[in-house]
Amino acid sequence: MRWQYAADSNVDLEQKFAYNQRVLDSTLALSIVVLALIAALALWRWRRHRGAVTKSFSVHVADSSSPHADRRWLWDSLTPREMQVARLVAHGKRNAEVARELCISVNTVESHLKHIYAKLDVHTRVELSRVIRDLAD
């Protein structure tokens, strides 16, 4: 009888060990998932704020004879992201290149360009480039 009791207790210990091992495995898996989510969130925030732009774009005062004098004040109506897109487009980048550099979709770039064109009253990329060139020092 004593021998059978010892065998039963060994089975109980093995079952408890297997249960504890499963708990540890699931806890480890959950910890890995949580760390991956934290890393993904940190990467997303870094990418989002990495290209943050302030409105410290230098503009020189123009005389009223300049054809773009009225557009100088419209520059402040652009959002920081629209300013980034406008600068990159003015430097000759295509929509796909702008999207890749700013980590946004091509459709978002096109949407920003529509807003920029409307706010600055321009109709083409060439005209936008000229306006940006005239606004910059």
Image (spheres, rainbow, N blue to C red):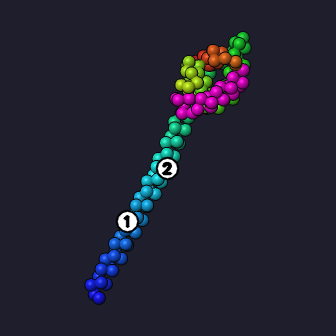
| 50 in relation to 29, above or below | above
Looking at the image, tell me whether mark 2 or mark 1 is earlier in sequence order. 1
Alpha-carbon distance for marks 2 and 1?
A: 24 Å
Q: Residue at x 46, y 57 (%)?
A: 30
Quadrant location of the N terminus?
bottom left
Does residue 20 appear to the left or right of 105 in the view shown? left
Residue 20 x/y as whole percent: 39, 68
The percent position of residue 67, horizontal first and vertical second, equals 71, 13
Residue 136 or 32: which is nearer the viewer?
A: 32
Q: In this view of the protein, which residue sits in the foreground, 87 or 31?
A: 31
Decide whether residue 114 is among the magenta residues. yes
Q: Secondary structure at mark 2?
A: helix
Of residue 107 and residue 65, the one placed in the foreground of this image is 107
Q: Please give left or right for residue 74 compared with residue 98 in the image.
A: right
Magenta stretch contains residue 64: no
Q: Residues within 10 Å of mark 1 (few under 14, many from 20)?
A: few
Q: Main secondary structure of the magenta part?
A: helix
Q: Which mark is residue 21?
A: 1
Q: Which residue is mark 2?
A: 37
For image coordinates 30% across by 80% down, the residue present is 7
> Which range is magenta?
99-121
Coordinates of residue 9 in the picture (x, y in percent): 33, 80
Answer with left or right where residue 79 lies relative to residue 9: right
